[in-house]
Amino acid sequence: MFIVKVPCINGLGKTLGCENAGNELLKVLRTIHTNEGGKIIDVDKLDLEEIHVDNSNLEEANKLIYKNAFEAFEEKPRVVFLGGDHSISYSLTRAFFDSVQNKGKEPCLIVFDAHPDCMKPMKEPTHEEWLSKLIEDGFPPKNVLIVGLRNSWKEELNFIKEKGIRTISLNRFENNYQDTCDTIMEFALGKELYVSIDIDVVDPAFAPATGYPVSGGLSSRQLIYLIQRINKIKTLKAVDIVEINPDKDEGGKTVNLGAKILSELI
């Protein structure tokens, strides 16, 4: 498993502190001896790297993230990126898209998020519009699935409808959890898969330390189960875990959940 820390933030001042998440997740990971599949967790034996970015120069930071991510996609069978806020996902998924296209394969993106992140893009996409920028740059919207939406601007809903982006609301989990999980798995069938996990998809009772917490999210157990199933998909190429803010994490709930998710991916 190749794990890359990406301590970049561009969250309109709301995500200051998320740049520290990678180090904190790995500290907690050292206390997890095995994951639920019985895999021994030895942090010292993991293939770890960090993309050293300058958050005062976002243009150069994005170029560096793209370059390093593209190289990782070309050389490694699977990568986990530790943010950082959700703005990092633009450069990461753009590199993924270009790498997959170069190989003549079809990309797929599943996003777990309480928000669609589809506002009108800025020059350097923030955590609020990285996805719309990616789609405007050519990522096929029919191959994008957003799971867990529960707080969207009208502009974002219009974008989702116009582009034909698929979404799964949390109500569907309430009605039939297993069938909904199956639908998510089937969406990725036959495609190269990237999964982006914004921790705010989880209810703030389980993950309070994030920039825009929204009540009524997935439980930590529901997300862990989904991650365990997704991790079995042979075409899974990359996962990012973003928007965890250790500076706001009283009691360590959010970092502990992030480390637990990471352990299940190993």
Image: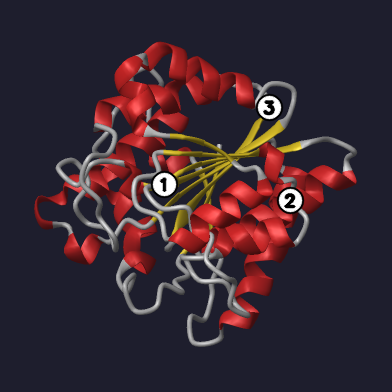
Q: Earlier in the sequence, mark 1 or mark 2?
A: 1
Label 3 Cα neighbours within 10 Å, binned few <14 / some 14-19 / many ≥20: some
Q: Compared with residue 31, is residue 86 higher up or lower down, i.e. above or below?
A: below
Distance between the Cα atoms at labels 1 and 2? 18 Å
Give 95 or 138, whichever is nearer the viewer. Answer: 138
Q: List x then y, in percent, for residue 37.
A: 39, 16
Residue ID at (71%, 49%):
96
Q: Which residue was labeled with disc 3?
A: 235
Residue ID at (39%, 78%):
12
In the drawing, does residue 148 fall left or right of residue 136?
Answer: left
Q: Please say whether residue 231 is visible from this viewpoint.
A: no
Distance between the Cα atoms at labels 3 and 2? 18 Å
Label 2 Cα neighbours within 10 Å, binned few <14 / some 14-19 / many ≥20: many
Kind of residue at disc 3? Thr
Q: Which residue was labeled with disc 2?
A: 139
Distance between the Cα atoms at labels 1 and 3? 22 Å
Residue ID at (88%, 47%):
102
Element assignment for label 1: loop
Q: Which residue was labeled with disc 1?
A: 113
Element assignment for label 2: loop
Residue ID at (47%, 53%):
116
Q: List x then y, in percent, for residue 210.
A: 27, 58
Q: Earlier in the sequence, mark 3 or mark 2?
A: 2
Kind of residue at disc 2? Phe
Give 62 or 75, whichever is nearer the viewer. Answer: 62
**Tags 3 and 2 in contact by the CB under 8 Å rule?**
no
